[in-house]
Amino acid sequence: MIRLSNLRLEHDVPFEYGKSQSRIICDLEADFTDVKSFWFSVDTEFGCWLTADVYDSFLVAMLYPAMYYGEDIDICGNVSKKIWHNINYYVQGLMKAYDPSFCDVSVTVQGFADAAKVDHLHIGTGFSGGIDSFSTLTDNFFNTKDSDYKIDTLFFFHVGQYGNVKERNTWLRANNRFCITKEFAKEIGVGAIMMNTNLFDFYLPKWEYDAGVLCRITSVLVFQKMLKRYYISNAVTYRELAKLDFTTHHVDMAEISDPIIMPLLSPNGLDILCDGAQYSRTEKTARIVDLALAQKYLNVCVNSSNKHVEAKNCSRCSKCLRTMMALESAGALQKFSGVFDLKQWKRRSFKYKCKQVFLYKSDSFAQDNVDFAQKQGERLPDKLTAAVVVSCLRLIALPRNFFRKLRAWVRKKL
């Protein structure tokens, strides 16, 4: 049994990695962890944004471990009836479609209530500087004047995506990335809020990927008292969703569920919207190439090495290379020389393009990049050349991968 109780709001809590925090916190009892409390926090100046009268965010966060371990959930307080109902009748079924090994669980609560709302409600989105973020802002900030849909607040949720949360460099990396959000928010005249949590004190590290959509929805619900609409930028298109084949690669839950699960877990008074599935990634890229702010702030890097804590693109990781290929195809790579190391791209572009051609049928991102390049008249390696180059690269990598695994095994034994 997982039991959540004693929900409360605390202020001026010391925080090892930054300013003092305000946080919503509840007591946690669960057989699968020794962690005794579960919290979400923001800088104290934003404490009034935290929703402390319902357990909605905590319930959604606990759903993945509950179904993974087969533990029922007991909440000693109120939750949104809509969210409770949809979890019982729809969301669990959706999660079991993703992973049939999941167990059905019961959710008992003390009562039902909707979060109390403030008079002036906001419209938010997450912003880390990536292609998806800029695409969402293009439609819902730069290209609209409708106050019912125009974004006025940017959020940065630190929920496991920047590496091992128990390491100091992970927090430094996240704080450095938030600097991009803050500076960008100042330029466009909106607010910016960073949220921290101890969620990954009891989440398994791989759940940042597997349960990412629940982490994002959970984070939005932390602020539901202040929000009427929230856009979650999506990386998978409607077409890719329709063609999804579980046997071709390991998918995360977001890939199969984003447009479905977000409205199911939207409480009364808050629309959580899946944004961007109407565009492919290369279409999103092409839409922002002439945006001066994108040329200044674009940050797509997923390098979580302890040697890379700066808030800049490494120009070597998979996402940096994928983006630079699309920018080159669009004839716009030079415009982004301030955020990418173009010398790195010149050294790596041929091998990377070979990999993209080789992976065309098994990787939707590769297919999108190759199709876009060909539409733009870009010359790519032929299939035979791509296959030979990729095979050679894999052979060369075998000794390195072996010794890396051996070193990891030795360290584990020691």
Image (cartoon, rainbow, N blue to C red):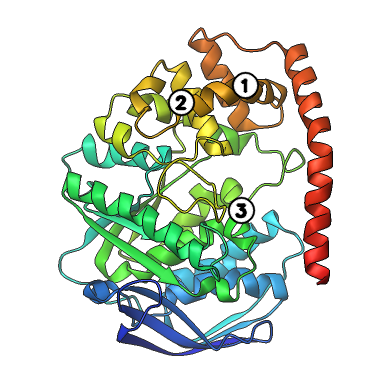
Q: Specify whether residue 308 is in view.
A: yes
Question: Rounded to the nearest whole Å, what is the CA distance between mark 2 and mark 3?
Answer: 34 Å
Which tag, 2 or 1, sits closer to the chain's start?
A: 2
Q: Specify whether residue 112 is in view.
A: no
Tell me the crowding category of disc 3: few under 14, some 14 to 19, or many 20 or more residues within 10 angstroms, Cα based.
Answer: many
Examine the rendered structure and indicate whether residue 281 appears above or below residue 145: above
> Which of labels 2 and 3 is toward the front?
2
Tell me which amino acid carries mark 1: Lys
- The picture places residue 378, in percent across and down from the top left corner, at 53, 10
Residue 253 circle label: 3
- The picture places residue 8, in percent across and down from the top left corner, at 36, 88
Tell me which amino acid carries mark 3: Met
Which residue is at the front of the view, 343 or 367? Answer: 343
Residue visible at 21% across and 73% down in the picture: 45
Helix, strand, or loop for circle 1?
helix
Residue visible at 20% across and 63% down in the picture: 121
- The picture places residue 360, in percent across and down from the top left corner, at 68, 24
Helix, strand, or loop for circle 2?
helix
Which residue is at the front of the view, 256 or 33? Answer: 33
Tell me the crowding category of disc 1: few under 14, some 14 to 19, or many 20 or more residues within 10 angstroms, Cα based.
Answer: many
Residue visible at 68% across and 25% down in the picture: 355
Question: Rounded to the nearest whole Å, what is the CA distance between mark 2 and mark 1?
Answer: 15 Å
Q: Which residue is mark 1?
A: 353
Which tag, 2 or 3, sits closer to the chain's start?
A: 3
> Which of labels 3 and 1 is toward the front?
1
- Quarter-wise, where is residue 72 in the image? bottom right
Which tag, 3 or 1, sits closer to the chain's start?
A: 3
Question: Rounded to the nearest whole Å, what is the CA distance between mark 3 and mark 1?
Answer: 28 Å
Which residue is at the front of the view, 70 or 181? Answer: 181
Please indicate whether residue 24 sits to the left or right of residue 414 in the image. left
Residue 342 circle label: 2
Please indicate whether residue 332 sits to the left or right of residue 29 in the image. left
